[in-house]
Amino acid sequence: MIVAWAIVAGGVGGLLRAEIGDIASRVTTKHASAWATFIVNIVGTFVLGVVISQLDANGRAILGTGFTGGFTTYSAFAHEPIEQWRAGDRAAAIGNVVGSVIGGTFAAAAGMWIGGGWH
């Protein structure tokens, strides 16, 4: 039953990610997809930090693997800086990679700290 709930949570995460993508495309036209991916990945790593700190194995499977797995996207993160670089926006490409890795790491640590899992 846990797997079924993880699948549902993954669907919810994916739908929420799509909605954030739609909002980003209305707010900005330049690199809207990259901004949406950046936002969901930073927020998702924070949420995962809290989930890891607060929930048991079943909760981690449902919300960690399911929801944040559906919400975040490594494949888009890997692709978008390449497109930014190819379009000649080298600063955006480098900023995307550095900001995502460092920001995601700090967001996960902050989530773990807030969740009480930072000892």
Image (spheres, rainbow, N blue to C red):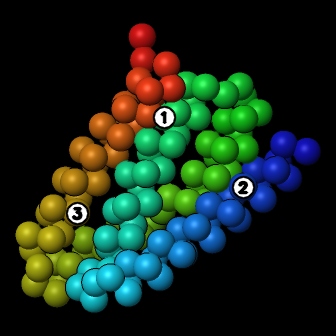
User: Along the horizontal axis of the image, is 85 left or right of 48?
Assistant: left
Between 80 and 63, the residue placed more toward the observer is: 63
In front: 47, or 70?
A: 47
Quarter of the view holding residue 21? bottom left
Numbered disc 3: secondary structure: helix
**Counting other residues with Cα less than 10 Å from the Cα at mark 2, is it few (<14), some (14-19), or many (20 or more)?**
many
Q: CA distance from mark 2 to mark 3?
A: 27 Å
Three-letter amino acid code of the residue under disc 3: Asn
Q: Which residue is mark 2?
A: 9
Distance Cα–Cα, label 2 vs label 1: 17 Å
| Badge 3 or badge 1: first in the primary sequence | 1
Q: Amino acid at mark 1?
A: Gly
**Residue under circle 1?**
49
Label 2: element kind: helix
Say whether residue 79 is visible: no
Judged from the image, the secondary structure of the residue bearing numbered disc 1 is helix
Q: Which mark is residue 85?
A: none
Residue 1: x percent and y percent?
A: 91, 45
Q: Quadrant of the C terminus?
A: top left
Q: Left or right: 6 with respect to 118?
A: right
Q: Nearer the viewer, mark 2 or mark 3?
A: 2
Name the residue type under label 2: Ala
Corner quadrant of residue 46:
top left
Residue 15 to residue 105: above or below: below
Alpha carbons under labels 3 and 1: distance apart: 21 Å
Q: Which residue is mark 3?
A: 96
Image side of residue 48 versus residue 2, left or right: left
